[in-house]
Image: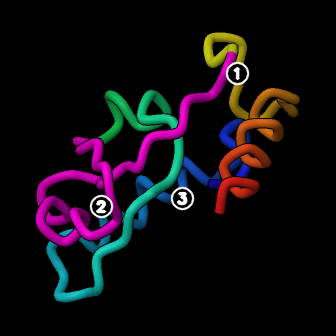
């Protein structure tokens, strides 16, 4: 997950729409599912191995909650999103 307030969610939506019907290796997103709701179908997964089964019909999302999500404004730096990214990668 990049910065949820940045362009990554928009690029992810466009990429999934372009590739979902193609014969490509499926991908999944690590992030807050709320970033994609309403834009495209999503499927919350518990493990990356579940991505291929849902990829053609929904964007697979490995959930990572963003605290204070309702304060997030696309295109505006948001300190809580950086903290969420650091928490996710510090567990790896």
* Colouring convention used in this rendered image of the protein: rainbow
Query: Disc 1 and disc 2: Cα gap in Å?
Result: 24 Å
Question: In the visual, does 47 lie left or right of 63?
Answer: left
Which residues fall within the magenta stretch? 41-67
Question: In the visual, does 20 lie left or right of 12?
Answer: left
Q: Secondary structure at mark 3?
A: helix
- Please rate how many residues cluster around mark 3, counting C-alpha atoms within 10 Å: few if below 14, some from 14 to 19, many from 20: few
> Which residue is under mark 2?
17
* Residue drawn at (48%, 58%) of the image: 12
x and y percentages locating residue 26 in the rendered image? 29, 76
Mark 3 and mark 1 residues within 8 Å of each other at the beta carbon = no
> Which residue is under mark 3?
11
Q: Nearer the viewer, residue 85 or 4?
A: 85
Mark 2 and mark 3 residues within 8 Å of each other at the beta carbon = no
Tell which circle, 1 or 2, labels the residue nearer the N-terminal end: 2
Query: Disc 3 and disc 1: Cα gap in Å?
Result: 17 Å
- Please rate how many residues cluster around mark 1, counting C-alpha atoms within 10 Å: few if below 14, some from 14 to 19, many from 20: some
x and y percentages locating residue 83 in the rendered image? 81, 36
> Which residue is under mark 1?
72
Looking at the rendered image, the disc whose residue lies closer to the viewer, 1 or 2, is 1
């Amino acid at each position: 997950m990049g910065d949820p307030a940045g362009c990554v969610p928009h690029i992810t939506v466009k990429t999934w729409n372009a590739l979902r019907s193609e014969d490509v290796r499926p991908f999944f997103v690590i992030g807050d599912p709320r970033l994609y709701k309403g834009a495209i179908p999503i499927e919350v997964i518990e493990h990356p191995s579940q991505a291929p089964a849902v990829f053609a019909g929904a964007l697979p999302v490995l959930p990572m909650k963003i605290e204070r999500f309702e304060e997030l404004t696309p295109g505006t730096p948001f300190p809580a999103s950086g903290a969420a990214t650091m928490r996710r990668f510090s567990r790896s």
